[in-house]
Amino acid sequence: MRRRCCGRIRGIWRATRIRASGFWSCARASRLTLASRRSYHSGPFDGAGRPRRLSRRAFFLKDVILTPEGYKQLKSELDRLRTEKRREIAERIAAARAFGEIAENAEYDDAKNEQMMLEHRIAQLEERLANARVINPKDIDTSVVSVGSVVRLRDVDAKETVEYFIVGSAEANPIERKLSNESPVGKAIMGRKKGEIVEVATPRGSKLKFKIMEIKAA
């Protein structure tokens, strides 16, 4: 009888050790998970004093160069999408659900697809703003072409003149004459001085020549 009791006690003790071992394994895994999540936090801090959360991909992104105006525009768009647009789509989804069966509800599918694209754009803007480097207009060197410069170029062959505002790729807009520093023309003129002639290769293999006529601050 005594041996049987001792055997039961040893069995219970072993089971307890196994459960405890499992518990601490889970605890260690939880700490590792928490540590890995914290590794995605990097300064600067947000408005509430909390470290900003960056995505895994954000660690491999270069700085997003923005003018003060460009930063304000992206921030304004993000605020609008987070509030007005999210509310608008949520109302559309609720209205579509009221029609009945979701499985064959085109309105519901359209609204959900739009919601997915909206969240993608919000995430994109959040990442750009998190990695933004806003240039100071006072720091712009007008002796050379740089982001923030307004450059007047002359097409040597066509004898035509055009003026561009050099910006980062995040706020490039051909209609507004905002030329990305990463575009073929942008790359060719970056760091160049007034009077220099640059060559830009076209997709067809030919080359265009531009003369830098003027460089000024925006």
Image (cartoon, rainbow, N blue to C red):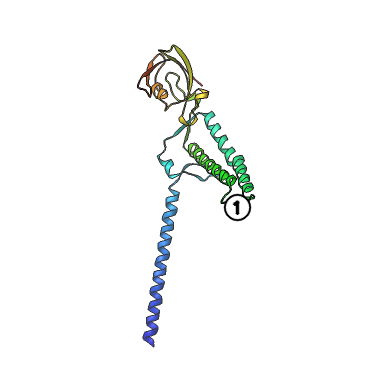
Residue lying farthest front? 104
The residue under the point 42% across, 38% down is 61
Total marks drawn?
1
The percent coordinates of residue 22 (x first, y second) are 41, 65
The percent coordinates of residue 125 (x first, y second) are 51, 38
The residue under the point 47% across, 42% down is 43
The percent coordinates of residue 106 (x first, y second) are 58, 45
The residue under the point 55% across, 32% down is 73
Location of the N terminus by quadrant is bottom left
Label 1: element kind: loop
Which residue in the structure is indicated by mark 1? Answer: 101
Residue 53 against residue 195 in the figure, above or below: below
Residue lying farthest bottom? 1
Looking at the image, which is closer to me, 189 or 81? 81
The percent coordinates of residue 64 (x first, y second) are 46, 33
Looking at the image, which is closer to me, 156 or 186? 156
